[in-house]
Every structure is written in structure tokens, then in C-alpha cells.
Image (cartoon, rainbow, N blue to C red):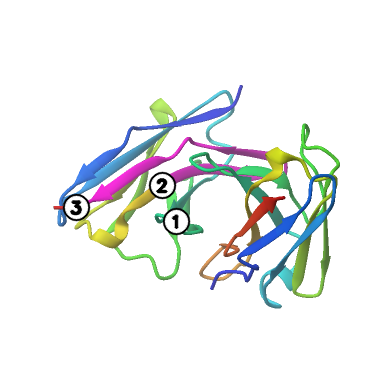
Amino acid sequence: QAQLVQSGSELREPGASVKVACKASGYNFNVYSLHWVRQAPGQGLEWLGWINTNRGIPTYAQDLPGRFVFSLDTSVSTTYLQINGLKSEDTGVYYCAVWDDSFDIWGQGTAVTVSS
Amino acid sequence: SALAQSPSASGSLGQSVTISCTGTSRDVGAHNFVSWYQQHPGRAPKLLLYEVNKRPSGVPDRFSGSKSGNTASLTVSGLQAEDEADYYCSSYAGGDNLYVFGTGTKVTVL
């Protein structure tokens, strides 16, 4: 069945970088755009942006810092979220998701902890 | 900015609870692309409704949705213990922020 599987939890020091992977399977990867959503500890969901998996063009939420970069590798049906210059406020669970009417699938989430 | 939801709601087993989601004429009020998600602790969100009131396959008809103006609502009827969770609305917003989520409502089943 269609699923998104994300890479495992990450612990980084402030200023470091992290790259979260989201691998799609069970559906046509190029048809549906891939969204990234963040959930800070004890907080709600925040839409970070999406990437067009057909053209590889990312769109970022208006206030998202330029430290956040979406990319993809269509050869392995995988989308990536890279965060550079990590700050403590980047701590949270990051989800990748596809949503299009009733076709709605989410990755299991990747916890990113930024701490010295 | 985030769509406004009441932080908490509660209802007794078998009763109903309604959660509201208030946006603006640029998001909730502009179209019918409003979705509702259920999230249990430590789990990814699960789609309950899309396009205001459409249920994906497998979602019980105890979950229903409506919209009036800039406010969308989710009603959970016949509350069950497993309905205790956080609920989030989501809307297409267009512009620079294509999608926006609600602030979330924690539902407690008494």
C-alpha cells in the first residue's frame, strides 16, 4: 500500500545541519506533491512548504528561514528536508505528507533535537 | 496565521462534541478545501474529513463536518474512548502560505 517512510531521529548541536529523508512507495511518486509539516514539542502542526515531485520545484512557507531546503531524488522516490545552522527552536517532529482529496498519507515523523 | 480552534473540548461517552475552526475570507471562507485530522499522542495525523464534509474510506460516519462563512466545524457523534485525541483543521490558503493548520483542539472523553 502507499506509504511514506522517514529516516530516524536526529540529535544535533546548535549550528550543525541535518537532512531528513522521506521515501515513498506504493504509488506514483511523480504525481503528488510532497509536503513538510513541523510539530514543535507540545505544539500544533505547522506547514513548512512543499515540493513538486514532477518538476523538483520547492515552495516554502512565507516566514520559513532560508536555512530550510527541500530536495528530491526521483531515482529512489525520496524527498529530503535539510536544515542548516540549526537553532534550538528547530527542535520538533518533522512529517512528510501527501494530500490530495482522500489520498492522504503521512510519514511516521522524524524527531529532530537541537541541543548542546 | 494559524486557524483558530478552542484549546479543549469534552463530552461523555456516547454524547457529541463539536469543534470549530475559524479562519478568514482568504482561507476557510474562500473555498471548500478544509480538512480535519485526528492525532493521537506520538502518532502522525490521520485524515478524518476533506473538502469540509467528505469522509475517506474507513472513517466512521460519526465524524461529520460543515462550514459557514469563515468557520468550519467538526462534530463527533457517539463519542468513544478512542476519540480522545487532538484534532486539527487545515485549509488551503493560496498566496505565500499555501496551506494553514488550526491551533488544535484536545478532545477529552469523560
Same subunit, tags 2 and 1: yes
Instruction: Pick whichever, A67 or A39, lies toward us.
Output: A39
Query: In this rendering, which labeled residue sits more in front, label 3 or label 1?
Result: 1
Report whether mark 3 lies on the same chain as mark 1: yes
Query: Reading the chain from its start, which is encountered first: label 3 or label 2?
Result: 2
Residue A42 got which mark?
1
Q: Earlier in the sequence, mark 3 or mark 1?
A: 1
Residue found at x 36% / y 45% = A71
Q: Chain of mark 3?
A: A
Q: Secondary structure at mark 3?
A: loop
Position of residue A23 measured from the top left corner of the image (x, y, whole percent): 43, 30
SS majority, magenta: strand
Chain of the residue on which disc 2 is drawn: A
> Where residue A11 is drawn, which disc sits there?
none
Q: Write the start and end of the magenta stretch as one range.
A: A95-115
Q: Residue furthest bottom?
A: B25
Q: CA distance from mark 3 to mark 1?
A: 17 Å
Q: Chain of mark 1?
A: A
How many residues crowd around disc 3 within 10 Å: few (fewer than 14), some, or many (20 or more)?
Answer: some
Q: Percent position (x, y) of residue B78?
A: 85, 45
> Real-space Cα distance between discs 2 and 1?
13 Å
Residue A112 colored magenta?
yes
Mark 3–mark 1 CB contact (< 8 Å)? no
Q: Please state which of the two labelled residues, at mark 3 or mark 2, is closer to the viewer.
A: 3
Q: Quadrant of residue A64?
A: bottom left
The residue that label 2 is drawn on is A94
| Label 1, residues with CA under 10 Å away: few <14, some 14-19, many ≥20 | few
Left or right, residue A75 beside residue A87: right
- State yes or no: discs 3 and 2 in contact (Cβ < 8 Å): no
Q: Which mark is residue A115?
A: 3
Q: For residue A90: magenta? A: no
Q: Nearer the viewer, residue A107 or B105?
A: B105
